[in-house]
Image (cartoon, rainbow, N blue to C red):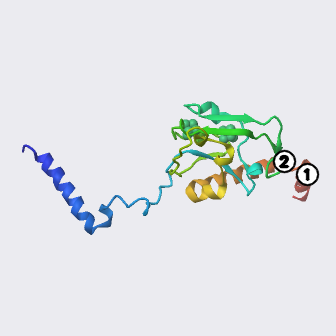
Amino acid sequence: MLGEGIVKGLAETARNFFGSYAEKDRLTTVQFPEERLPQAEAARVFPFLVYDTDDMEKGLRCVACKICEVECPPKCITIEKSTEKKPDFTGKPQFFPEKFEIDVSVCMSCQICVEVCPFEAIKMDTAFELSTDDRFGGLHWPKERLAKPNEYYHQIHPMEAAAVDEQLAEKKAKAEEKHVPAAAQAEGAAAR
Ligand code: SF4
Ligand code: SF4
């Protein structure tokens, strides 16, 4: 029948319109900003840098390997690697980024930096109310603005952050196993 599709479409629209007064599920919008929908765990906006403990300088996981800088498609990451190592929060000497900056006016939220980072140091943030009238300074985010604690990562991506913590703990345990002094190993063997 001619126009059958149009009639069906209008009927569906009417069903949703009137149904939204009776069924909450049919009401797909909310009165933002007074009311907010919870964000999906997989939501992503711009990257942030994760740090452990409460000391950003020591706890930053980034070791300035620059892989993300090279792999970022629009080249919006700028890193200056330190010339010397300093102890991280575990006491291990590490290089660190003297400068780590993202130009968020160029970032396309592709998450490639996250995928390529071997140190679980960069993750995607979900914060989205970021408008600014400072076109230059406001859109070049320095390390100090990008750095956020692991607790924050757990708040916005709980399942992913828990899995990452587990992986890091496994890696740490394996690394510690390798470094068990030979004497201790011999002692263990003798005891057996
Ligand atoms: S965020 Fe990851 S990939 Fe990028 S420089 Fe730091 S450690 Fe390397
Ligand atoms: S999300 Fe994509 S565009 Fe943005 S900094 Fe990471 S790699 Fe670059």
Is the residue at mark 1 in contact range of ligand 1, meaning its CB lies under 8 Å from it?
Answer: no
For the N terminus, the quadrant is top left
Picture residue at 71% right of the left edge, 47% below the top: 61
Question: Can residue 162 be seen from the camera position used here?
Answer: no
Estimate the x, y position of residue 144 in percent, counting from the top left.
68, 47
Q: Residue 121: which disc?
A: none
Tag 2 secondary structure: loop
Estimate the x, y position of residue 175 in percent, counting from the top left.
78, 47
Residue picked out by circle 2: 179
Picture residue at 66% right of the left edge, 34% below the top: 78
Estimate the x, y position of residue 185 in percent, counting from the top left.
88, 51
Picture residue at 24% right of the left edge, 64% below the top: 19
Residue lying at the far front of the rendered structure: 133
**Number of other residues with Cα within 10 Å of mark 2, as a class: few under 14, some 14 to 19, many 20 or more:** few
Picture residue at 18% right of the left edge, 50% below the top: 9
Instruction: Give the quadrant of residue 191.
Output: bottom right
Is 80 left, or right, of 181 in this rendering? left
**Number of other residues with Cα within 10 Å of mark 1, as a class: few under 14, some 14 to 19, many 20 or more:** few
For the C terminus, the quadrant is bottom right
Instruction: Give the quadrant of residue 93.
Output: top right
Estimate the x, y position of residue 90 in percent, counting from the top left.
80, 52
Residue 112 in the image: above or below residue 154: above
Residue picked out by circle 1: 186
Residue 142 in the image: above or below residue 176: above
Q: Nearer the viewer, residue 169 or 41?
A: 41
Amino acid carrying label 1: it is Ala
Q: Determine the CA span between mark 2 and mark 1.
A: 13 Å
